[in-house]
Amino acid sequence: MRSIASVIKNVVRAAGGLGRCCIVVALAAGPAFAAGDAPLFQWKSTAPLLLPKPDAAHDSLALKDPTVVRVNGKYHVFMTTASERGGWEMAYASFTDWSKASEAPIAYLNLSAIGPGYHCAPQVFYFAPQKLWYLIYQGAAGPMYSTSATLDDPMSWSAPKAFFSATPDIVKTATGKGNWLDFWNICDAKTCYLFGADDDGRIFRSETAIGKFPRGYEGTTVIAAQEPNRADLFEAPMIYEIKGTGKYLAAVEAMGSKGRYFRSWTLDTLDGAWKPLAASLDNAFAGALNVSFDGPFISDGVSHGELVRDNDDQTPTVDFCKPVQFLYQALAPETGEKNYLKLPYRLALLTTTKQPAFCPARK
């Protein structure tokens, strides 16, 4: 096995990203570990499993920003597609096993009621109180959503609706541009929380009573976490309940000297403080220094993705009593491409070979 750190040289980072997100309070000071300590997490990556499949109507160049649930023995993956013709749009694929992912047909959601145009960075989950599937994503109106009663019918999604009638003032003030992106929803027993990033060092959080979802977020947005250096808290926030503990794991994409990587924190409550877990480049949640490959494939860091959950509902949950998996967007180093839209991202799968002992005794 070869470490990505041993082969990536002179990585030139592409500037920009797909979306903006929101953060509410300053992070707890200091990294989880001193430089040189062994990382808490170590991962092994597959080669790309999902590749673009252009057709006559879709000149797809890349697959990005995956969200995944496993239902009735089948993986359901929603993702962003990039094309010169359509820009950023969304697509869907399903398969029974990761080894069959490359064979899965890709359905383009611009053919559904979601329609064409700027829609990307999805998150999918089943909202049990309403017995509906929700697809949350970013669009021209900020955070948006569509619903479906039939997960495996990509043409069943409803037309987009916005969570907010206008960008919250705190987002406008914080960024100076009013940009936010990469939205993530998670609920506890009483409250739903919508997180987002701004590509400028902040994660925002909005909340609503679970009985009001998807309404009620307006007027509640705060900064959940922030860093003075925008690269340290960039985009793609994801928050999960850690199964059996009542605590939560947060991870956010950052930019470093060895490409994109993820930092992580723990939270006692979804509206609580972010406590560093694996939150530095040397001790990252996932990045160039703690990912290895069996074969010749190498990725330029670890970028926007999603952990494979233990459930499919409104409280995304990860089980640390077994190896954790992470579907992410991979990019071969030194592609030479300067246009962010054309960067040839593909979807690959990480599996932990080392992870924290967040596994309570099971009865």
Image (tube, rainbow, N blue to C red):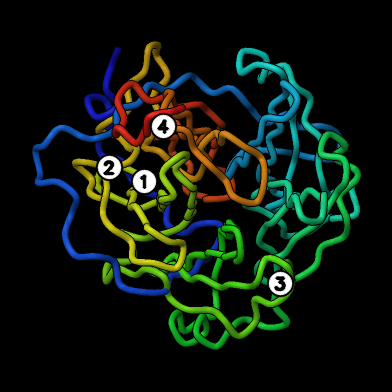
Which residue type does callout 1 highlight? Phe
Answer with mark 1 or mark 2, whichever residue precedes in sequence.
1
In what quadrant of the picture does the N terminus appear? top left
Marks 3 and 4, how far apart at CA: 32 Å
Task: Residue at 26% x, 25% y: name it.
Answer: 7
Query: Which comes before the other along the chain, label 2 or label 3?
Result: 3
Disc number at residue 320? Answer: 4
Label 4 element class: loop
Q: Is residue 83 above or below residue 307?
A: below
Residue type marked 2:
Ala
Q: Who comes first in sequence, dot 1 or dot 4?
A: 1
Alpha carbon distance from label 1 to label 2? 6 Å
Q: Amino acid at mark 4?
A: Phe
Q: Are marks 1 and 4 in contact (CB under 8 Å)?
A: no
Provide the residue designation for mark 1. Answer: 262
Badge 3: residue crowd in 10 Å (few <14, some 14–19, many ≥20) = many
Q: Residue at x 68, y 65 (%)?
A: 210
Location of residue 51 (image quadrant): top right
C-alpha separation, residue under disc 2 versus residue under disc 4 = 17 Å
Please name the residue that numbered disc 2 is placed on: 284
Q: CA distance from mark 2 to mark 3?
A: 32 Å
x and y, in percent, of residue 272 in the image:
39, 67
Can you give x and y, in whole percent of width and height, for residue 48 in the image?
54, 23
Left or right side of 171 for 258: left
Q: Earlier in the sequence, mark 2 or mark 4?
A: 2
